[in-house]
Amino acid sequence: MAGLGAVNKLTDEEQQLLQNASDLVPVLREFGRRIDEDRHIPEELIQKISRAGLFKLGTPKKYGGYEVSIRALIEIISEVAKGNGSVGWVVQIINGNNFNASLLLDSEVLDSIFKHEEEIRFCSVLQARKAIVRKTEGGYFVERGLWGFGSGSKHATHALLNLMDPKAVQENPGMMLAVVPMSQIKIVDDWYTMSLKGSASNSLEINNLFIQEQYVVVQDQEFINKSSSMLRQLQGIDRYKPYANVISSLTTGISAILGLARGALEHFVDSAPRKGIAMTIHRSQAEVGHIQYKVGLAAMKVESAHLHINRSIENLENHIKNGEPFSKKEFAQIQTDIGYAAMLCTEAVDMVMVESGGSVIADSNPLSQIYRDIRGGANHALTTASTCLELYGRILFGLPPQHVLTISAAPLLKD
């Protein structure tokens, strides 16, 4: 199920990290109920993930990480999510944030962060619920700020927080991303949910904190104009810098959703031959025609999702390689590919849930946990299909975009 040519494009090191993730899948499944009951990932499991190198996928090599490709990041994290959705979500968030932090922050700032910890793990929230922030000499003073949802915050060393709340974003689409050590943040224990229970996506609170200017990246029009003018001059990983926001859609949104759908399908295919259908003479679901049809259709949905994800990666990589700006349609297509892929994965899980009988509603049934987790993941702002499809429709109609990522990227787009 990890096929369609993607895995063949991974380096030997990336293949080994993918194998490390595969080796952890049975262990993650054993921890499933405990993770949900504890509402976070047990420390012993965090250590296993760390020893497997799975928190350093998006960390630059100069800081001891693997700096894997975006394609490898998605394949490896989706494999983790096959074992457990909450773990996949946290591994996804931390690696995506580590990658994006390495793009956004100056090398001096990165040096100061990574030299103090053996393993840096960033959580993030890309819009404040409420933020009262004053520009002061040498930095910014946060009188009060509240952010939700801080996925993985319990296991993070730092947070990457947008100091702008909804009102500020509506007035000036963009971001003011601040790096804040978790020691300076209060984690509000309010993550009581039906979905991704173990992701520790608690709210984060800051009161009366000064943040030095070098630890804040203001992604305003001046920032984007400067980035767009340098498209052809940037080299190495720096070529990704102008596209950091849209890269977030790929690195912190879709991987776990894809893995959950793959895991649901594998579980159903493995269980169906040994399971009958209540109130019928059928002894094996696998022998029933309409279930064979549903499994085939569900599998095609997951594989189609993978194809859309691969297309978005290829479109992004080709533009970055050539230093070329996107058209609005090309840029919107990347965002829509991700939202549409999330929708297809969710539909696939819905289909196998329907055919799983009444026992599937038990908390102990793996499909029940997958169903809850993928529903929460697909509702994330970066993967909500309705928002992404509206964006694509607006562009096709020649209307201005409504999505903040596309609006803020205007200087990077062709007229």
Image (cartoon, rainbow, N blue to C red):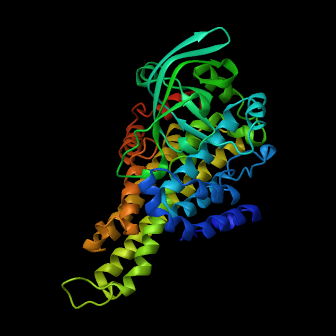
Q: Quadrant of residue 366?
A: bottom left
Q: Name the residue rendered at 45%, 24% in the picture.
A: 165
**Is any atom of residue 56 visible in this view?**
yes
Above/below status of 135 relative to 187: above
Give the x, y percent position of residue 161: 55, 30
Query: Front-most of 235 and 359?
Result: 359
Q: Name the residue rendered at 63%, 25% in the picture.
A: 217
Q: Quadrant of residue 53?
A: bottom right
Give the x, y percent position of residue 40: 49, 50
Give the x, y percent position of residue 297: 38, 72
Q: Is residue 277 left or right of residue 400?
A: left
Query: Front-most of 334 and 27?
Result: 27
Q: Is residue 240 left or right of residue 334?
A: right
Above/below status of 188 relative to 49: above
Query: Front-most of 198 and 167?
Result: 198
**Is any atom of residue 415 visible in this view?**
no
Give the x, y percent position of residue 76: 62, 60
Q: Residue furthest left?
A: 279
Q: Name the residue rendered at 44%, 80% in the picture.
A: 270
Q: Name the residue rendered at 42%, 51% in the picture.
A: 197
Query: Front-most of 286 and 141?
Result: 141
Above/below status of 80 relative to 217: below
Q: Is residue 340 left or right of residue 160?
A: left
Above/below status of 357 relative to 203: below
Q: Quadrant of residue 413?
A: top right
